[in-house]
Amino acid sequence: MMKLHIFAALSFGLIAAPVVALAGNGADILKSQCISCHATVKPEKPGLDHIWERKGPDLYYAGSKFNKPWLVKWLQDPVRIRPAGELYRKHVKPGDKEDVVDESTLTPHMKLAKADAEAVADALMALTGPAGLVNKGAFKGGKVSMTMGSMFFNKLRGCGACHMAKAGTGGLSGPELYTGGERLQADYIYSYIKDPQKFDPGVWMPTLNLAEPDLQRLTGYILQLSAPEGK
C-alpha cells in the first residue's frame, strides 16, 4: 500500500490525487501521517543537517505561520508552493542553458475531505512553536507602494533571485510569494525576514539586517501581492 505523506507538498510538487477521507481527528492524522516528512516538535539539533535531510518544512510553529482559512482550502486542493521542492538541489537537473526542475522527483500529494482538512488545520494552528519565535504585533499594517515594493524586492534586495512575486517570474529555490499574503501571517513574514536563522539555523536565506522601515515595507509588499493591487 502506498504510504500517504499528507503534508509533503507544502514544499514538494504535486500530481493529481484522489480526495481521501481519513476519518480521524487532526492530532491523530498529524501523528500517523505527517511526522515522516515534517517536524511537528522542535528538532533537538536544528541546523544545516536537519535542513538538508527534511522532506518538508517544519510544522512545529505552523500556528504562528499560516492563516487557518488558507490551510483548510489548501489541504482540500493542494498546489505547489516551492517550485523545485525541498530541498532545491535534490530536484533539479541540467538543462540546455540552466538547471531545470526535475518533475519526476517531486512527491505527489493527496487531497483531504473537508472535515479532515478542517480537523488538521485546527491541529496545525495549535502548534505555535517556542515563545518569542514570532514577534507578535511587529508589523504595523501600513500600505506600501507596489512599484517601490517591487523595486525593493527585485533590485535592491535581490529577493527575486530565489522567490517568485508573480507566477512564472523569479527564482525557484524558495517558496513562491505571490500567495504569501493569503498563506502567511504578517508577523511571521516580518519575523522571518528579520532573522531567518532564528527559524532555520544554517538556512541559505541571508539575514539582511534591514532597518525597521525596510522590514515594514518588504512585509507589506509581500502581503499585498495577494491583494487586488498586487495581481
Image (tube, grey):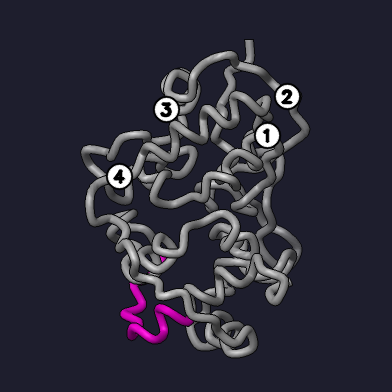
Given residues 216 and 91, the one toward you in this image is 216
Nearer the observer, disc 1 or disc 3? Answer: 1
Point out the residue furthest to the top here: 1
Image location of residue 82, percent across then percent down: 59, 52
* Magenta segment includes 184: no
Give the SS element for disc 1: helix
Q: Position of residue 75 (x, y in %)?
A: 62, 36
The picture quadrant where one finds residue 12 is: top right
* Image position, residue 42 (x, y; %): 28, 39
Instruction: Identify which amino acid the numbered label 1 is placed on.
Output: Gln
Label 2: few (<14), some (14–19) or many (≥20) C-alpha neighbours in 10 Å? some
Q: Disc 4 residue type?
A: Gly
- Tell me which numbered mark, 2 or 3, is placed earlier along the sequence: 2
> Which disc is residue 35 wearing?
3
**Left or right: where 153 falls relative to 16:** left
Q: Is residue 204 above or below residue 42?
A: below
Please report contact status of discs 2 and 3: CB closer than 8 Å, yes or no: no
Callout 1 touching callout 4 (CB < 8 Å):
no
Horizontal relation, residue 20 to residue 123: left or right: right
Q: Amino acid at mark 2?
A: Val
Query: What's the distance in space between the residues labelled 1 and 4, CA to CA?
Result: 25 Å
